[in-house]
Amino acid sequence: MLSYILKRLAIAIPTLLVLIVISFLLMHSAPGGPFTSERELPPQVLANLNAKYGLDDPLWKQIGSYMWGIVSDFDFGPSFVYKDRSVNEIIAQGFPITLTYGLLSFAVAVIVGVSLGVAAAVRHNSLLDYVAVGVSIGAQVLPNFVMAPILVLVFTLWLGWLPGGGWQGPEYWIMPVIALSTSFMASIARITRSSMLEVLTSNHIRTARAKGLPERRVILRHALKPAMLPVISYLGPAFVAMITGSVVVDIYFSTGGIGKAFVDSALNRDYAVMMGVTILVGALTIFFNLVVDILYGWIDPKIRY
Amino acid sequence: MKFRTTLASSALALSLAFQAQAADVPEGVTLAEDQNYTFWLLDAIKSMDPQINTDVEGSDVLRNLFEGLYNEDGNGELVPGVALEHEVSEDGKTYTFKLRDDAKWSNGDPVTANDFVYSWRRLADPATASEYAWYMELMQVENAPEIIAGSTSPEELGIRAVDDHTLEVKITTPLPYFPQMLVHGSTFPVLQSAVEEHGDDWTDAGTLVGNGAYKLVEHQLGERVVMEKSDTYWDAENVVMEKLTALTINDVNQALTRYLAGELDRVDIPAGQYPRLKEEYPEQAVSTPYNCSYIYMLNVGEKGPEALKDARVRKALAYTIDRDIIVDRILQGGQKPSYNWTHWAIADFERPELDWADNMDQAQRVEKAKELMAEAGYGPDKPLDLTLQYNTSEDHKKIAIAASQMLKQINVNVTLDNYEWKIHTDRMQNQDYDMARYAWCGDYNEASTYLDLLTSYSGHNNGEFYNDAYDKLMKDSKTAEDPQPLYKEAESILAEEMPIIPIYHYANVDMIAEDIEGLPENNVNNTWYGKDLYRTAE
């Protein structure tokens, strides 16, 4: 197992390198630059800016010094657009926010989703099942950019219970978490339900029941764990997607999270911020894929590496 | 605004007639307990550094944290800031400012003429790499172009401190509107010791040293900016509003909902919603002119289509677009249809009488356009194909679709090209377009801020319209006793040559809380200062 983990980590480094180089080249090939603006800058002013940010160097040199900054000082460079801030500062401010609502959303999505899915499968074809399926389909088809404004309309304007946006304390977390977790929760519920239904018809469950185990024990002890296998493979990427933020949540709830910063950096051609967030998301994706693979082995002893 | 013209004509000591006072609360008005003002920002503030900032929203924040030589009042007239008054030399090229001696930085240091010298040099210095370095050139400050080009040291800039409270600025050509330009954020002073001590972090909350009426207490990027009244401000005793909060909300509709929920005191009204809100909240929905002009730029240069090199075709295109439909049916926010380039509300500016604008109705204009197209050799048998490029936005799209339908009347087939903002701009600047959506917002309240853009030497003239007579008028206007007739003539040339299709002049349409007073009502730049605001009791 240890050698497997080491091997995967070793592969991660070249993967990240390829990611960095490709993103870097793609970004620089997009028309316009960080200083393209409606008021075209006088050539000398533009030259001064390019010199300050090293954009007048050949591309290979830019990539080289960028990588060196990361490796030697863990410095992702200055933002070309938010000029008072470095990429490290922008990520340090935005990522904890994103991480907070991401982790909470993940917890809500998993707990509610799995419970709903299990309940629906156990009471297959009952009213509970229909309601659970109905709710999860409804939640899935309602996009969060529709849900977010509705939440604000209801809880802020009509009821006056919650602040409409911002990031100042726990009461500001509620609506972002609902908006972000709902569709993930729905997916988890559906996957859990179908996987559970399949597991419940398998031989070892029949055996467990034949032994006279109480139903509760059959479900929790014997059915749930194998039923989680497809759920887990969904959870890995879903987890990364949640903790690396959602541009919709950031826009509608003004959280100041990293999702909006990422999209803005692409539109603004803020090369450094975009690279910084890409590397962050890339590294997290690689890491959590590894975690998922390890979890597989733990859940299903038949899987060996 | 006689102020400007008299200034240009003779050397005189100018003393602004009245002493500026912060919030001007009329007698008998009861102030509310709560003196907090919360306003809306569409985007995160890119920089709190006066010499680095380039955004309108950034300027709104900076005006409260720093104070330049002059401020504007609610009508856009100059009022003293750090400068009390100035004198202009006989030749109009040397300005001597008398600075107040009670101005202080938020760390207690006095604000001196040297702070301005340092800051202006900093703006031009290539090492600062400011995107607004060109503003020093626009202001014609001596040696600015050479300093930006790196061939002369920043110490050579035409600004010096005669003593702690006397500042002298030398410019290369007389500029009648020079004092107006001093309201711009990039000319605000910064404190050298604060900048040098903290480097790029000097603008962080808690570290930032300013000389404005407020100090920065919190800045969560993309979330909020909080400013509290500064006790060191020279006029602090007249500042009523205790706290200013700016909330970033990236979605206009969401911002409106939060305004209606009472979270904000001022917010922009999304396009098309003004009539409804005006009816529902007549006291809160307001529309005021705003210093920007919306046009379709025509590519008349080398890379442009052959047809657009013909002024008759350009005029026909301009005549055919029905601006009333665009303004009344699409935008619905008090914008004005435009038939010329300079915004109608610019101080002292008067548009020349234009036959097509003033003496024809839309049907007659279309008739005239058809004639012009026929003369140019186009008609039902020989339609003209053009592309119209716009950057991603619902409003731009709606207007472009309407325009393309209107142009069908004169057998012009328009293909719409939508690009993301940077690509749109890049293509325009490389002349890869036929017609393109463009908007310009004036830097100051004077017509040259628009008209200079279409000179052959402007650097923003992306349509490559080059006209010697036009250039000459604009050059002459810089030294003219009264530049207004020349501006009028320049507009007439534009109407004759039609290098751009004017569409509409902007308006600010806002919801403003009823108990907030002191926001400008008649200032095209919408320059507002927290120090002028107050909240009345119900």
Image (cartoon, coloured by chain):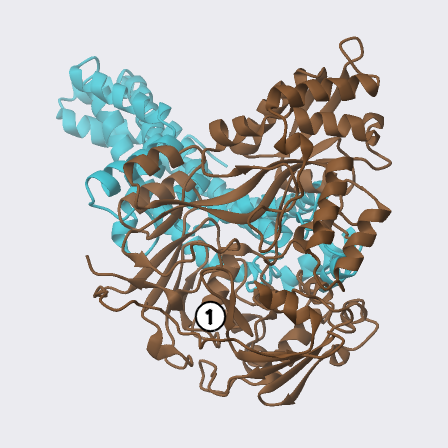
Chain colours: A cyan, B brown
How far from the left and from the top, in percent, is residue B165? Answer: 57, 87
From the viewer's perspective, tell me whether residue B77 is left or right of residue B481. left
From the viewer's perspective, tell me whether residue A167 is left or right of residue B137. left
Corner quadrant of residue B433: top right
Residue B114 visible in this rendered orientation of the protein: yes
**Which residue is the site of mark 1?**
B65
Q: Mark 1 lies on which chain?
A: B
Residue A34 visible in this rendered orientation of the protein: no
From the viewer's perspective, tell me whether residue B514 is left or right of residue B58. left
**B184, above or below B407, in the image:** below
How far from the left and from the top, in percent, is residue B82? Answer: 52, 78
From the viewer's perspective, tell me whether residue A295 is left or right of residue B149. left
Most distant residue in the bottom direction = B163
Residue A110 versus residue B184: which sits nearer the camera?
Answer: B184
Q: Is mark 1 on a helix, strand or loop?
A: helix
Residue B83 versus residue B75: which sits nearer the camera?
Answer: B75
**B306, above or below B286, in the image:** above
Corner quadrant of residue B149: bottom right
How far from the left and from the top, in percent, is residue B376? Answer: 83, 21
- Count of numbered badges drawn on the protein: 1
**A177, above or below A218, in the image:** below
Corner quadrant of residue B4: bottom right
Taking the spot 71% from the left edge, 51% from the top edge, the residue there is: B487
How far from the left and from the top, in percent, is residue B145? Answer: 79, 67
The crowding category of the residue bearing disc 1, from other C-alpha atoms within 10 Å (few below 14, some 14 to 19, many at least 20), is many
**B388, above or below B120, in the image:** above
Give the amino acid type for the residue marked by disc 1 in the picture. Answer: Leu
